[in-house]
Amino acid sequence: MSSEIQERSDIDQIPVAARPATTPPPRPQTWVLKLIMAVTGSVFVLFILFHLAGNLKVYLPDDPQGHFNEYAHWLRTLLNPLLPGSTFLWIFRATLVACLCLHVYSGLTLWIRAHRLRGRHARKVHATKHHLTGRTMLWSGLIILSFIVFHLLDLTIGRGVESKDFSTKAVYKLEGGEVVTDAYSNLVHSFQRPEVAIFYVVVMVVIAFHLSHGLWSVINDFGGTAPRTRTVFLFLADLVALIVVIGNASIPLAVLAGGISV
Ligand code: HEM
């Protein structure tokens, strides 16, 4: 009897309760991290679609500047007077930041775990679309993270615009006479810089791949194995990604082409 078999039968002699504990599962457990990724990722998808609906107001034929700035103002004063000032917007921002931290933490932890488990002798698989996007999830995630920092500096805080001598102090008078930030002019001025417009278009493509693969993973991780359900969900994942890339990327391109202007 080889020593390994001998060892095995030795263990079998010990009552189960008294056997040495096996390696405890890593904490937080992988399924918890995947659940966090799925929930926070879904919050982002909803936010991106909601944000896209607002962005598309730049295409309204009648007074897009007015409609866009009204919408930005509406977002700031949502649930007034129940919640004073921009309280709702700050709750919304805090939720997004919390989701972002959880998403990045879980994503990095899962990535490190998968790499440790895979070791040096990784299984060779065919380079399908999902395999390629899956392998680049970390990098596409980091690109999106840098984009968000730039985007906030550029359009919400205004630094990026300022450094290019565009006025970030542009203000707009709403119909009621209230003076608000001219978010529309800031957007147009920002995208009139070709390098910024191209950067936005490239990032939207990256977001589309990240989103499509993210939704695909959610379907796999949470048991979407029935062929019909799978096909429908995979189609929806690609459709959402396509809507985001076409809807958003068209805006900087339209500004560059002169179709949207102040
Ligand atoms: C071409 C596509 C996009 C355009 C034209 C656009 C436009 C804008 C504008 C104009 C603002 C400032 C609104 C204001 O001052 O009230 C803004 C804010 C913001 N955008 Fe975008 N955006 C785009 C894509 C994205 C994407 C893909 C994301 C997420 C990954 C994103 C995340 C945000 C966030 C988090 C804010 C700050 C909201 C706040 O706290 O006020 N944007 N965007």
Image (cartoon, helix red, strand yellow):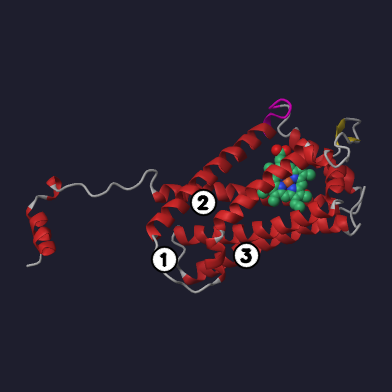
Judging depth in this view, the residue of 76 and 134 nearest the camera is 134
In the rendered structure, which disc, 1 or 3, sits on the residue that comes first in sequence? 1
Cα separation, mark 1 vs mark 3, equals 28 Å
Secondary structure at numbered mark 1? loop
Q: Nearer the viewer, mark 1 or mark 3?
A: 1
Decide whether residue 95 is among the magenta residues. no
Residues at marks 1 and 2 touching, judged by CB atoms closer than 8 Å = no
Cα separation, mark 2 vs mark 3, equals 16 Å
Q: Is residue 237 visible?
A: yes
Cα separation, mark 1 vs mark 2, equals 26 Å
**Label 2 sits on residue:** 38
**Label 1 sits on residue:** 122
**Label 3 sits on residue:** 238
Q: Is residue 37 above or below residue 232?
A: above
Q: Which residues are magenta?
A: 82-88
Is ligand 1 less than 8 Å from the beta carbon at label 2? no
Name the quarter where the N terminus is drawn.
bottom left
Residue count near mark 3 (Cα–Cα under 10 Å), binned few <14, some 14–19, many ≥20: some
Residue count near mark 2 (Cα–Cα under 10 Å), binned few <14, some 14–19, many ≥20: many
Q: Is residue 148 above or below residue 250?
A: above
Amino acid at circle 3: Asp
Q: Is residue 53 visible?
A: no
Amino acid at circle 2: Ala
Q: Which SS does the magenta portion mostly show?
A: loop
Question: Can you tell which quarter of the image residue 197 is in?
Answer: bottom right
